[in-house]
Amino acid sequence: MHNMIARLGRTFLALLLLSAVAVGVLPARAAEQSPMILAVVDVQRVLREAKASNQARDEIEARRTGYERDLEAQKTQLQTAQEQLQKQRAVLSPEAMEQRRQELEQRLNDLRRQTEERRSMLQDATNNVMNQLRQEMGGAIAEVMKSKGVELSLPRSAVLVFDNRLDITNDVLETLNKRLPKVDVPLN
């Protein structure tokens, strides 16, 4: 009995839907709604090619190169001091030898700590720059969407195939370059 009532209810709804289509109520509703305007943005390309991104990358890389040069010089000094200590082994007392060995060990530990601190600082600067770029890119995307009447934009990585006319990456890149031509790189 319950199944029969459920079937009658579904049949009634189907007939009601068919009559609405026949009368033209549903097609009129569909005609009122315009299709959604979509766009696609290659986020990785924008982040890679933005002027501010390149400027920050160059600054960070220059600082990294300077750090590496400085650390190499310190390593060379430590190696030289270690070689000299080995040569003096015969003339130094065991206590003096142990003291100098501990001093060298401390300098080596300081160098390792300094290396890690600099690596961490460079990573923090990179993360800070990328966060600034992403935030400003969001504003650039919104600006381009508004100017083009786009209702929804999707990252390129989320779309398998699309019509190239939907790609607003170049417009976003141009807008981002105007909005953020340079970014401050927080390096101490």
Image (tube, rainbow, N blue to C red):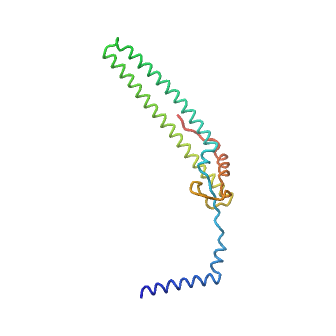
Q: In this view, does 6 lie above or below 179?
A: below
Q: Residue 183, position in %: x, y?
A: 60, 41
Q: Quadrant for the N terminus, please.
A: bottom left
Location of residue 93 (image quadrant): top left
Q: In this view, does 32 lie above or below 183?
A: below
As drawn, the residue found furthest toward the top would be 91
What residue is shown at x 43% (from left), y 19% (from top)?
81
What residue is shown at x 67% (from left), y 46% (from top)?
178
Q: Residue 49, position in %: x, y?
A: 63, 44
Q: Residue 89, position in %: x, y?
A: 35, 15
What residue is shown at x 65% (from left), y 81% (from top)?
24
Q: Is residue 122 above or below residue 27?
A: above
Q: In this view, does 58 lie above or below 144?
A: above
Q: In this view, does 129 lie to the left or right of 111?
A: right
Viewer-proximal residue among 87 and 66: 87
Location of residue 25 (image quadrant): bottom right
Viewer-proximal residue among 55 and 11: 11
Q: Residue 6, position in %: x, y?
A: 46, 84
